[in-house]
Image: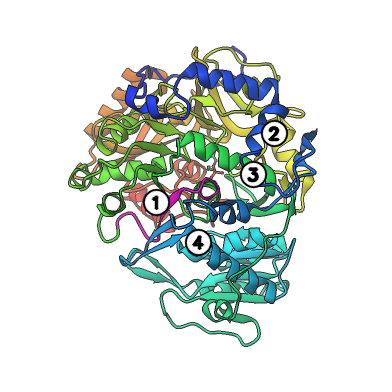
């Protein structure tokens, strides 16, 4: 093994094939069928993607399928289309016309259903309103909203007229809005008076006011009234959403846009540094999200599909709005927190709307485990037929819990691996075709040539950990970093020439299954063993009393680095030195002595990004007794850090 190899220490070997019933009705029913299609997608990418793209509407058919001048790709060159047209107009001539497109539930309990006909109308009206303000093709538009249908309407209206949206998660504050609007030189920003969150009102408009003071490019602010909190409206600059659309026509002809027309910018910070404006374009992203939604979620006409992500993240873009709507699906959208008014909220939503496909994040599943099974079992979840996760590696024990308690032991789970940059899912089990292994994102999706590479660029052996790369372009890949081609090259294509590097570590097992072991930045070196944190964390989470664990390395004079584990216990358990000892023994027994944490620190919570990923960077500083440094704006709850520090002193 080379020095830079990441050692994999997981012994997970359980396998969960889909039920015969599920496979029988699935779009892809066997591994052979998957393999055949996958092979074709790599051997004949032109033919494969041309065929897939034909399911969607093009004003002009693409001439060239892909043009690859590394690291820059163009897809469906010469084709013209319109994503909003494909999400809406395309469905109006058939039986989907009056089908629910968005089934929305507000946090206070209000419910709105928008059919395709109605959603199309609203999008047209808003598109006309934007054009009326002089916003057009190529202009950048900020969207800083909560989880209301108007957020989707705003996105679709931008896509329709060819304006490039930049959604900023509603949990960010003024500075983040300002920096993103300035970087993109946005002309307008769309917001709300306030958003409901866990019973209180988050004053979004006030943040926009503060931000826009320092955004010279912003000419217009459009404000949706949702919470009726008091706001200031600046004459000439600020417009009331409802007044604008009241005077707008509900017909709008979708223009034909070039396949490579920029669709949206979405800022992603990674673990350090200035946020990068990941740029996606129209045609490739459309085909990618359409196809993955269809096959990964095995979408059927009668499904009620719910993705719990926020529209502020790429998951909300691809799998609440564009992918499901391009398929003519019915998507649930929920405004509030999972524990508002109590931890039963998600399960009551599933019961109330008959949700059949449920897609969430490991951080949420760990919270469900922590809150206890009773909240779940008292609801009728028999409508569910498929579960999914995204965002982090899922701990195998948590996966098994999810399958048994939420899925009643009958629903396949799709552990979907992808990134803001990849635009759509790049690795996943196909639910009817592939026997899942808990903790593995399984196999690459069609057209994705995923490789685990050593530092020297050669391919790693079976089960040898290395760097996860994709060595060919795929339709929904990012096109560049907004305004910074150099950073795009540096960040993604400098490690291996012409190959996209994900920043993640992974291994591939004897079945060809991929196991992501976490971000390369988080790899720890203990006595010469390079370990991804995910597997040690999973070992801790497999202990009956542990709800969540975050493992980091601190400098150690004997071992190079030593492991410190931050551990959150399940409700009702008390930390003790004996338990700490027991947990260390447990990891030693499961993985090996070398992986035993030097210290366990019990915590009520661990710091996470606002999208729910554990922020090990901050824990590293804390564990080493340093002040936390670097970008803190993505931290979900600053109080968590203070609390961890207090625990240390106390
Ligand atoms: C991690 C979210 C393991 C990974 C769509 C990736 C995962 C980063 C998985 C992207 C998964 C996402 N298994 N790790 N199924 N899904 N990740 O940009 O580290 O918010 O690089 O996109 O999340 O996060 P992003």
Q: Specify whether residue 486 is in view.
A: yes
Q: Earlier in the sequence, mark 2 or mark 3?
A: 2
Secondary structure type for disc 4: helix
Q: Give the alpha-carbon distance from disc 2 to disc 3, as whole Å.
A: 14 Å
Q: Earlier in the sequence, mark 1 or mark 3?
A: 3
Q: Nearer the viewer, mark 4 or mark 3?
A: 4
Residue at image mark 4: 117
Residues tagged 2 and 1 counted as in contact (Cβ below 8 A): no
Q: Give the alpha-carbon distance from disc 1 to disc 3, as whole Å.
A: 43 Å
Label 2 CB-ligand 1 distance < 8 A: no
Percent coordinates x, y for residue 301 in the rendering = 43, 43
Q: Give the alpha-carbon distance from disc 1 to disc 4, as whole Å.
A: 54 Å
Label 1 CB-ligand 1 distance < 8 A: no
Q: Nearer the viewer, mark 2 or mark 3?
A: 2
The residue nearer to you, when weighing 233 against 537, is 233
Which mark, residue 285?
A: 3
Magenta segment includes 224: no
Which mark, residue 645?
A: 1
Residue sitting at 70 percent across and 47 percent down? 58
């Amino acid at each position: 093994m080379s020095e830079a190899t990441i050692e994999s220490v997981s012994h997970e070997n359980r396998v969960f094939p889909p039920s015969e019933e599920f496979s029988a009705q699935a779009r892809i029913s066997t591994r052979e069928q998957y393999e055949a299609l996958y092979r074709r997608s790599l051997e004949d990418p032109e033919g494969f993607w041309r065929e897939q793209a034909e399911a969607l509407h093009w004003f002009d058919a693409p001439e060239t399928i892909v043009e690859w001048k590394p690291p820059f790709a163009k897809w469906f060159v010469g084709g013209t289309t319109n994503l909003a047209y494909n999400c809406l107009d395309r469905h109006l001539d058939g039986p989907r016309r009056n089908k629910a497109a968005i089934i929305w539930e507000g946090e206070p309990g209000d419910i709105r259903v928008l059919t395709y006909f109605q959603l199309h109308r609203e999008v047209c009206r808003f598109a006309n309103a934007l054009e009326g303000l002089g916003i057009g093709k190529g202009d950048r538009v900020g969207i800083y909203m909560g989880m209301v249908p108007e957020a989707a309407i705003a996105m679709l209206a931008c896509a329709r007229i060819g304006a490039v949206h930049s959604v900023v998660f509603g949990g960010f504050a003024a500075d983040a809005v300002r920096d993103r609007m300035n970087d993109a030189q946005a002309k307008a920003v769309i917001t709300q008076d306030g958003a409901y969150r866990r019973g209180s009102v988050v004053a979004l408009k006030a943040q926009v006011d503060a931000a826009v003071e320092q955004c010279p490019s912003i000419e217009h602010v459009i404000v949706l009234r949702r919470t009726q909190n008091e706001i200031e409206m600046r004459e000439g600059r600020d417009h009331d959403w409802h007044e604008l659309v009241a005077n707008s026509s509900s017909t709008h002809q979708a223009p034909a846009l070039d396949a490579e027309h920029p669709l949206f910018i979405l800022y992603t910070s990674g673990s350090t540094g200035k946020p990068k404006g990941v740029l996606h374009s129209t045609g490739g992203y459309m085909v990618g999200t359409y196809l993955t939604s269809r096959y990964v979620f095995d979408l059927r006409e009668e499904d009620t599909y719910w993705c719990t992500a926020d529209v502020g993240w790429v998951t909300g873009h691809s799998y609440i709005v564009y992918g499901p709507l391009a398929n003519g699906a019915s998507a649930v959208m929920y405004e509030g927190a999972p524990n508002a008014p109590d931890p039963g909220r998600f399960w009551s939503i599933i019961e109330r709307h008959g949700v059949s496909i449920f897609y969430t994040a490991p951080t949420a599943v760990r919270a469900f485990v922590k809150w206890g099974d009773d909240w779940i079992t008292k609801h009728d979840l028999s409508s569910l037929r498929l579960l999914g996760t995204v965002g982090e590696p899922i701990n195998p024990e948590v996966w098994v819990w999810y399958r048994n308690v939420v899925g009643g032991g009958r629903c396949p789970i799709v552990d979907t691996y992808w990134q803001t940059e990849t635009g759509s899912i790049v690795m996943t089990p196909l639910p009817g075709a592939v026997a899942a292994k808990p903790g593995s994102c399984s196999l690459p999706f069609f057209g994705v040539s995923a490789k685990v590479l050593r530092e020297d660029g050669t391919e790693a052996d079976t089960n040898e950990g290395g760097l996860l790369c994709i060595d060919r372009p795929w339709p929904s890949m990012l096109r560049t970093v907004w305004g910074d081609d150099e950073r795009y090259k540096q960040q993604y294509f400098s490690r291996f020439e012409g190959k996209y590097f994900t920043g993640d570590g992974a291994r591939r097992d004897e079945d060809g299954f991929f196991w992501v072991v976490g971000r390369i930045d988080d790899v720890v070196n203990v006595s010469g063993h390079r370990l991804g944190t995910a597997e040690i964390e999973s070992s801790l989470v497999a202990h009956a009393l542990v709800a969540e664990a975050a493992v980091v390395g601190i400098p150690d004079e004997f071992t190079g680095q030593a492991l410190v584990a931050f551990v959150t216990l399940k409700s009702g358990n008390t930390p003790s030195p004996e338990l700490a000892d027991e947990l260390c023994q447990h990891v030693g027994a499961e993985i090996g002595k070398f992986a035993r944490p030097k210290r366990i620190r019990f915590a009520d919570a661990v710091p996470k990004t606002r999208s729910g990923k554990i922020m090990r960077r901050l824990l590293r500083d804390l564990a080493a007794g340093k002040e936390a440094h670097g970008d803190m704006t993505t931290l979900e709850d600053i109080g968590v850090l203070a609390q961890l520090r207090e625990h240390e002193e106390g």
